[in-house]
């Protein structure tokens, strides 16, 4: 495994293997909804590595290893399962429609990116967007998370959280009038 993914699963103690496995499963939903494609790929690879090592060490604790046999699945069975998993992932990627904007598109000016994001809020009913949708819009329009965070943290804030929504403030509308991106 790469350094980004930490110590190879085979080298972890039983306690650390279980702790990292629990953490990986707990983070899965967040990575699926909010992570980049690279984060999702890396997370998937690490989670599979941890699961396979756990299964190798403790087959009797999982449904995969409890099929009336006391021994772990064979190496060939584990390889076959991984190949099928990756084959499904590759097929899903190939079935996806190409992204509308090329990934190599030049980066947007930071002020323009913030203005474009605030404009989306200004156009939304009551200046309000669901937090998950707002996160996805922000990733598209202002890929640098620091630019987005500035909108919430400056004084006065240009965006604010309101339960499960994100809302443009009066200060945000005023800022947008000054920095509006020409259509």
Image: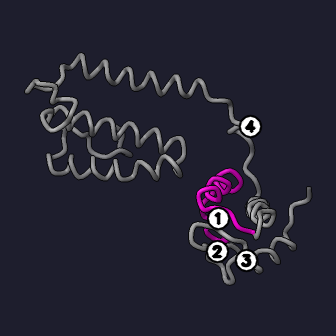
Q: Residue furthest bottom?
A: 155
Residue 142 lies in the magenta-colored region: yes
Residue 181 sits in quarter: bottom right
Of the residues under marks 2 and 3, which one precedes in the sequence? 2
Residue 67 in view here: yes
- Tell which circle, 3 or 1, labels the residue nearer the N-terminal end: 1
Residue 8, located in which quarter of the rendered image? top left
Q: Nearer the viewer, residue 104 or 83?
A: 83
Q: Which residue is mark 3?
A: 169
- Which residue matches tag 1? 148
Dot 4 or dot 3, earlier in sequence: 4
Q: Position of residue 95 (x, y in %)?
A: 60, 24
Tag 2 or tag 1, which sits nearer the N-term?
A: 1
The residue depicted at 80 percent of the width and 74 percent of the height is 173
Q: Which residue is mark 2?
A: 160
Q: Rate crowding at label 3 as few (under 14), some (14 to 19) or many (20 or more) other CA atoms within 10 Å.
A: many
Task: Using the numbered discs, state the Cα–Cα distance from disc 4 to disc 3 in whole angstroms.
Answer: 30 Å
Mark 2 and mark 4: span between their CA atoms? 29 Å
Disc 1 residue crowd, few under 14, some 14–19, many 20+, Cα 10 Å: many
Relative to 139, residue 50 above or below = above
Of tags 4 and 1, the one toward the viewer is 4
The residue that label 4 is drawn on is 100
Indicate how the structure is coloured in the image.
one colour
Q: Is residue 32 above or below residue 142?
A: above
């Amino acid at each position: 495994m790469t350094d980004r993914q930490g110590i190879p699963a085979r080298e972890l103690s039983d306690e650390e293997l279980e702790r990292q496995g629990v953490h990986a499963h707990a983070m899965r939903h967040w990575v699926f909804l909010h992570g980049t494609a690279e984060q999702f790929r890396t997370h998937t690879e690490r989670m599979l590595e941890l699961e396979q090592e756990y299964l190798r060490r403790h087959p009797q604790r999982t449904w995969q290893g409890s099929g009336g046999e006391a021994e772990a699945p064979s190496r060939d069975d584990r390889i076959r399962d991984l190949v099928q998993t990756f084959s499904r992932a590759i097929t899903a990627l190939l079935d996806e429609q190409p992204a509308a904007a090329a990934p190599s598109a030049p980066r947007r000016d930071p002020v323009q990116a913030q203005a474009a994001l605030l404009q989306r809020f200004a156009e939304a009913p009551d200046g309000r967007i669901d937090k998950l949708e707002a996160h996805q819009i922000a990733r598209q329009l202002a890929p640098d998370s620091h630019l987005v965070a500035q909108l919430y943290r400056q004084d006065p804030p240009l965006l604010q959280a309101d339960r499960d929504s994100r809302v443009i403030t009066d200060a945000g509308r005023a800022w947008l009038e000054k920095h509006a991106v020409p259509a």
